[in-house]
Image (spheres, rainbow, N blue to C red):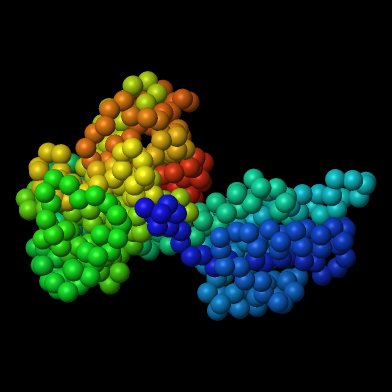
Amino acid sequence: MKKCTEHPKPAVKVGVLFLRRKRPGFLPEWGEIIEKQVKACLKTVPFEIYFPAENIVDSTSLMSVMKECNGQGCDVYVVIQPTMADGRMSPVLAQMSKAPVVLWATPEKQDGSMISSCSLVGAHTFASNLAQSNHPFNFVYGSPEDKKTVEALEEAVYRSYAQLKLTGAYVGMVGYHAPGFIDMHMDPATLSTIDMELMHIGMHEFIDSVYAVSDEDAKKDLKKVQALGLEVTDDITEDDLLLASRYYLAMKALMDNMPLQALSVRDWPELSAKQWPYLAMARLATEGYAISCEGDGDGAICCLAAYLSGCGAAYLSDWLEHDEHHITLWHGGAAPLQMCQGLDSKIPPNIGRHFNVRNPAVVNASLKEDMPITVFRIWHLNGQYFCSAIEGRTVKPKRNLKGTNGLGFFPDTNINDYFVRMIKMGYSHHPIVVEGHKKDHFRLLTESMGMIFVD
């Protein structure tokens, strides 16, 4: 399980633009100090950083630099004014940046009577200009030597990257939603309001692709499953595991080759009559693929948004039961392994049969305890997309349950009240769990995409 402790993160290339001045003003030496601090700080962030060589002082030089950065494959731009720059450069940012721009304002020098930078004033001006042109942006304010500022910068970059990649993304749907789960029905017209597209794949087409996986490829993949070190229980055979590998390889190929950024599969009743695909889904989720069961397409979008915005692997759960401040987060057995207790724990994960329809192959596992979590959901109702999120932590469950089991504690939320308010708004029955406290992160991302965030 050591291989599964780290969350997968997308590879993001960031172009860093220092906007300078044509004529002297403020304290140039303070601007130089800030620039050095920023460059030192950016050595610690989990992105590939690109610094263009050309000095940016006006719209013409900015346009030239952004053409260069686009040619270098920069995904996101971080824009810094060590001292206040020409506001007429903001339309160039709006026109040439596909992703929301990250505006980073840095602090004043805290001694002397001279105004040292006006960086916040400049960034405020740019932000207002971008808002007027309806170009999304993310905003960060603080010292590059402040840990909280660096954390806010990382989240802002990931949000910008997520919005870039979610725009125009393809969501695959194998079959339809599971019988009776109308709350998970995807509407292509509503999906288009957030600039995403739905692609249908027939159930028989998918099943044919599963059985088209060669014996050689399935056996090669089985060795990777065995290398995970999970105990195999319930008299599950090698043939069972080979079919699980076929599911995994077929879904992975579907996402990689169509290509699809997210995938939802109607696993029952058709697939579960012989074998559940949950082991395959757990492996894909562990690797950072946005995948969901039971035809929950919006759930797959949630997992994609979590991964792209730097939250790592996401767990699609049922809301099994609750009291005033706790939610039992349980599902059939497809949680990413990073979020589960390890092989050396008292309750190690294992490969077993489904708790109800006693077919293989699911991952029985318990979520790590005392883990900060955010439970969130994106869903649609009446032609509009919504999002909501609450923050808490995992605690020891009152009892062990087959499948994926966890207990979330939310001290600042009245769960009884929250649940009723959400279901009246159509909140789908699969909440999504990510590690860390990310409520504001998801609020800023989804509002920027035109969704309504509900507290």
Res 13 → quadrant: bottom right
Give the camera-side residue of 163 and 327.
327
Q: Residue furthest right?
A: 113
Would residue 202 be seen by someone viewing this image from the given angle?
Answer: no
Res 387 → quadrant: top left
Q: Tell me where residue 138 appears, x and y as whole percent.
A: 58, 53
Q: Residue furthest top?
A: 324
Q: Tell me where residue 349 appears, x and y as whole percent.
A: 29, 45
Q: Residue at x 82, y 54 (%)?
A: 117
Q: Residue at x 30, y 69 (%)?
A: 256
Q: Residue at x 25, y 47 (%)?
A: 350
Q: Residue at x 22, y 64 (%)?
A: 222
Q: Tell me where residue 304 appears, x and y as whole percent.
A: 37, 55
Relative to residue 125, is residue 160 drawn left or right? left
Tally of numbered discs: 0
Res 20 → quadrant: bottom right
Q: Tell me where residue 198 appears, x and y as whole percent.
A: 26, 59
- 195 shown above or below 432: below
Q: Quadrant of the C terminus?
A: top left
Would residue 75 be seen by someone viewing this image from the given angle?
Answer: yes
Relative to residue 140, is residue 211 drawn left or right? left
Give the camera-side residue of 55 and 331.
331
- 267 shown above or below 183: below
